[in-house]
Image (cartoon, rainbow, N blue to C red):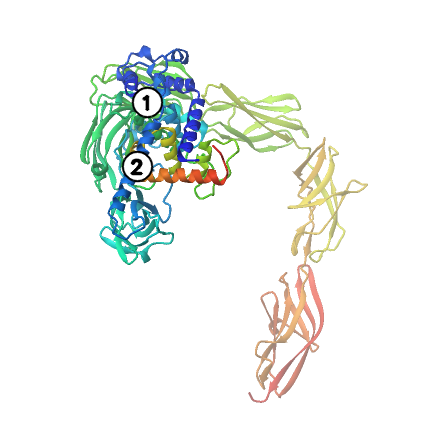
Amino acid sequence: MDLENLLLELQQGKMQALEHIYVLTNTAVYAQVYAILRHPQSTEDVMQDTYFAVLKNISRYAPQGKPKAWIVTIARNQALSYLKKNPGGQFSPLDDSIPASEPPEDAGMIDIAQRVLKKDEFELVMLHSVSGFTHKEIAEISGTPYATVRWQYQNALGKLKKYLEENKISL
Amino acid sequence: MNFDDIEKKLKEDGVRRANGVDKNKILSKALDESASENRGYQASGAPASDAGYDGRVAASVAMPPKKRFSKLALAAVMLSALALVGMTLMFVFYFLPGGATGKVPVYLGMQVHGITENGDGLIAQSSLVIGGDHTGRDDTIDQTDPFGGASTTVEAEIQSTLGVLPDNKIDYYAKQNEDILITVKLYNPDNYIILSFSLNGVFYQSYQFQDGSDSENLVLKTNVGEAAGIAAYTIDAIKYIDGNEIKDAVFSGDQTVKVGVSTEKQFVASAAGETVGLNSIAFNVHITDKLGLLELLGGNTAAVLFDGEKIVAEQTLKVGANAVSFEGLASNKVYQYAVYAHYNNLSAESRGASLNMLYVKAVATRPTVLFDTGSVTVGQESVSFALSWDEAVGGQTATYIDLYTGGQKVRSLSGNSANGLLSGKTYEIVLGYQNSLDIGETITLTFTTETKTAAAIGITGADATRDSITFGLDIDDPDNVGRVTAAELYNGAEKVASLDNFDTPLAFTGLDADTLYRISVTYTYDLNDGEGTRTLTEVCDVATLIDPIEITSVILVSSENPRAGEPVSALVGFTNAQNVTINSFYFGDQKVAAEIRFDGRAMLTFVPEIDRGELSLVPTAVEFTSKGMTRTMDTIVSPGVVISISITADTTFAGFYPDAGENTVAVGEAYDLIVELDNDSGYLANRVMINGIWYFDEAITQFGNNYIKIHMPAQDTAGDVIYNLTVVELLGYSGMLVFDIDVVCTVTVAAAL
């Protein structure tokens, strides 16, 4: 059963559908929330809020062929709301004005991307590479023009590639 | 390594992280919170029994295969992109002018940046407006926290319901008059020289490109201008130089970029005409969208009603005038209504659609009945109150009125007052009534009766004779809470007398002489505060006197006419029937220590405190010690014992000179000489001797205390006359004071002036 039908089942009160929905969307939700908050524990907190909001608003869901975008948009709103409630919570030490620091040896690719890329670029990479959204879908979610998304994404991967090569980090 | 490898690693890392999150924890909490909500899932009509998810049940549900992000799809997208570029390049090469060997520059797109970053924040700041007509109960509502620490807010509840707005396609958000950088991106592998490009019909030459430009990045600085809204920049020609020819680059990317130019308050709401009923809240709101952003970029605006936990009603609004009405509400309950707009306000902060709170206000629906706080009168032992019934309520009758204190019912009240209350005590009056829906409700009036002031007393004017003690009382009892209940006299621990009548002055009589007594006065009072009566005891120690000490003789043993500051000595004889220890005698206010001689008389030696005049040497009072108590009492004087001395001040000579302006006089002109003294005692001048001649009576005039004018006869001949002052006599209190002086002054007698 696809995500759209699972959401409709949840709308009809079949709560078992929630776990299926989670399995199908947790990576995308995690990527979207982490892309904004960049803090693992806060990301988990907002994931809870996100699935609660999905339940809370399931009656409002109308099939439009974009079920994952609907959930990820909720996740994005929740993350932004969380960020607003925690104004000092710029969780990552990363600042665009500060040169990227050396990532730890055991850093995953997301850690490296978080340190190398600007915020917008990092969110874009997370949504495309991790969440699996197309550039067009990302453009709709983030309110950014499609051409800009595509261009920024190529730039971001270029930055990552250059960083990996310069630091002799093998994949 | 290539991009695919990086994407693969990112995906793997993301999946690993996402799967590391405790799924059951996430879902359990979501379901728990959902179950505690009054709306949401259950409001959709789903059966409540299905809400009972737990991880164990869920774990048994077969999981569908994970939807893997389609690598094929990605590849297809990339192939499509490559195909597009490839076809474009093929097109370019095919149509290249003859002889051209390089690759034609291809326009790929544009980017927009700010000169100064205008913020990385993603959240718009809400414009919370608190206002409106604050009347009645609104004054009691804390507009900043109307629900007293509610776990959620109206803004948060609205936020959770917002949907996805259409793509705004805004490349950059700028403020009015902000400088921006537009970068034209080219594919220009052969580094052709770019000559110019046309943006919105205006040609920009290469010299106008900004630092940082190169053959594939043409950076142009421009200003977005004053006008708010969406500014579009369209590129329609790029010229480059190929050898000796100027050629056009090929366009492949989107030729337009859009910049959102924001202003403050382009979307505002003004509310008025608020009407709050027993079960309804209505108001008018006018929404202004100055830039037409709602129509241009999508979004919605609505009014919601929040009860502190959830949104209980929502009404969609339109730009312009709206009448909002929320019905079916509970009476006497605080609600918060809000007007919001969810739209792209073109601000750099929000960078897209965001929630904008346009108006928020908390009000309370009318209560059926209230205590009219303006008519509540609280006294020390009573309270009276009036009720204010809503006109819409029929009957307007309280079903009961009960009086409570400390959670315990005191009694029921039959009217709108209560008497016989304790003072300084907090009470509650609970009034039961039927509301407009004929449902029983209560209202409560909490008040504290005024306290009564504690009494205070003091013993005043305690005085003793040889056999009696009299005293007065100073009672401060403004609320008349008590009275004197005892006035007793003690000798040590033994009570020797008590009074039945407490009218002042109070007196104990028939007492022993030379005895220390303690007066004890008890005041008993009740503040009516439930703590019972209190007693206040004030004491005062007083000793009775001894037999009178009579002064029988005074013998002066020093000068009868002492100068000021000179010691005086007198031998004083006196009676002492109780043979008490005599410490001192008093001459008026001056206390003089007594030196008791072997014959029982006392030698008194002292320096009088006065510096002139008569002083009686008969003591007026005596200080003595008996039974450990030191007391003072007046003396009595035997007939004929009268003696006094006269104290003179220390008078001195100060000067001798002609009167003012008379150093030189004419022949035949009379003149005066002046003798100046320091004569604070004011002794009278008797006579003075000048040049061996006494001048007195009419020949001298004393003015003030300190000046004696000597009238000299006129001289018949001219020349200097020398006067030698040798004696001044003054009349003292008890004899003549004679000053022997030897000083001269000169008067010049002129023949003609």
**Rendered residue at 46%/24% (across/down):** B481
Label number found at residue B450: none
Marks 1 and 2 sit apart, C-alpha to C-alpha, by 35 Å
**Rendered residue at 69%/40% (across/down):** B622
Q: What secondary structure is found at the residue carrying circle 2?
A: helix
Is residue A76 shown left or right of residue B365?
Answer: right
Relative to the observer, which residue lies in front, B65 or B602? B65
Q: For residue B401, what is the image quadrant?
A: top left
What residue is disc 1 on? A54
Relative to the observer, which residue lies in front, B451 or B636? B451
Of all chains, the one bearing label 2 is: B
Marks 1 & 2 on one chain: no
Residue found farthest to the right:
B598
Q: Position of residue B285 (x, y in %)?
A: 21, 34
Q: Amino acid at mark 1?
A: Val
What residue is disc 2 on? B81
Q: Amino acid at mark 2?
A: Ala
